[in-house]
Image (tube, grey):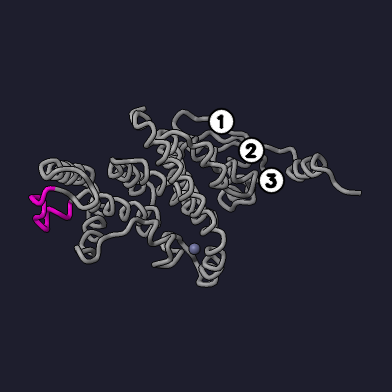
Amino acid sequence: MTLKIFDLVTYYYSELGTEEVTLYVGEARKKFTVHKKLLCKIDFFLGAFCRGFKEGVENTMDLPEDHPEAFELFIDWVYKAKLPAWEDMEKLLVSYAQVVAYHEHLQKFYIFAEKTCIPILPNKIMDLLLLVNMTLRAMDKTLPDTYLRALAAAYDKTTEGSPLRKLFVHSLVWSLWDLGIRNVEEDLVEEDSVEGDSVGAGEAKAVQQGWVERVWEATSDRVDLFEDIVTEFKAYSPENCPKFPRDSRWVNEASPCYFHSHDTEGEEARCEGSWETEIARKLKQAIDWQVELIRVVAQDRTWFMR
Ligand SMILES: [Zn+2]
């Protein structure tokens, strides 16, 4: 006899048992109810719920420092055992505001996954985040703002060496460089325009000065962030410009694990092995989607003003 879908679903849920736990997430204590058996497959929760701690006795847990948006993505992953496919997400992210929101939710999800030490999951989130990051690049002319917000969260919530810090330091430096800060050093501002951009000399200089001040303000109480940004800047020269993170990760100029965290070389080798087929396919879909997006935006420029 062949099992029907309904039987499989019934089997799946019967395997989960009936015991549930309640989690209150964020300052507003948003309530989530999850099957205990499923959650306890993760060491972080196994320790709290299944080893005699207060949470295990009461079957409740408070996560005041985490974000409900991140926890929703986490619960979705827990039940489906996989992250959303990019080809599905691209259909849902139809406005600029939605892409920015998803970008931020993925950052919070990454921070949560890193904090709870779930193996491999941060790398999977990073792959998705890189795709959304790339999409923002095609849509957003004020990227440094987005990256400064991301960096503030990353430096508050992660520790030294986190790939999330690395990604956004790299992204910020790339975007500032791209905006024309390099021209201050080269004294090329008087030559009318920034390469690849259409702003004039006066406007470019104002943009540069504005960004220097904003980075200075944003890093005034974060010496480690300031040091990381300066170190990244010093690694480049006019002959060796920073590349958009996509280039390191996706075009195979560096390791495909450039923004990953791996405990062993074997784990990294498996990651590299699966990268070329799976990720290259996703990249092509992302580029196809961007081409379509740019075509739509070109038809209706007021779309950006929403
Ligand atoms: Zn990897």
**Residue 276 horizontal/vertical position (percent):** 53, 64
Give yes or no for contact between labels 3 and 2 (Cβ–Cβ under 8 Å).
Answer: no
Identify the residue shown where x is 44% and y is 45%. 290
**Residue 75 horizontal/vertical position (percent):** 59, 41
Identify the residue shown where x is 56% and y is 64%. 274
**Viewer can see residue 34:** yes
Q: Give the residue pinned by disc 2.
A: 34
Q: Residues within 10 Å of mark 3 (few under 14, many from 20)?
A: some
Foreground pick, 246 / 25: 246
Q: What segment carries the magenta color?
A: 181-192
Residue found at the very far front of the displayed protein: 299
Tag 1: amino acid:
Lys
Foreground pick, 262 / 99: 99
Foreground pick, 32 / 82: 82
Q: Give the residue pinned by disc 1.
A: 31
**Residue 226 horizontal/vertical position (percent):** 22, 53
Q: Give the residue pinned by disc 3.
A: 37
Give yes or no for contact between labels 3 and 1 (Cβ–Cβ under 8 Å).
Answer: no
Magenta segment includes 183: yes
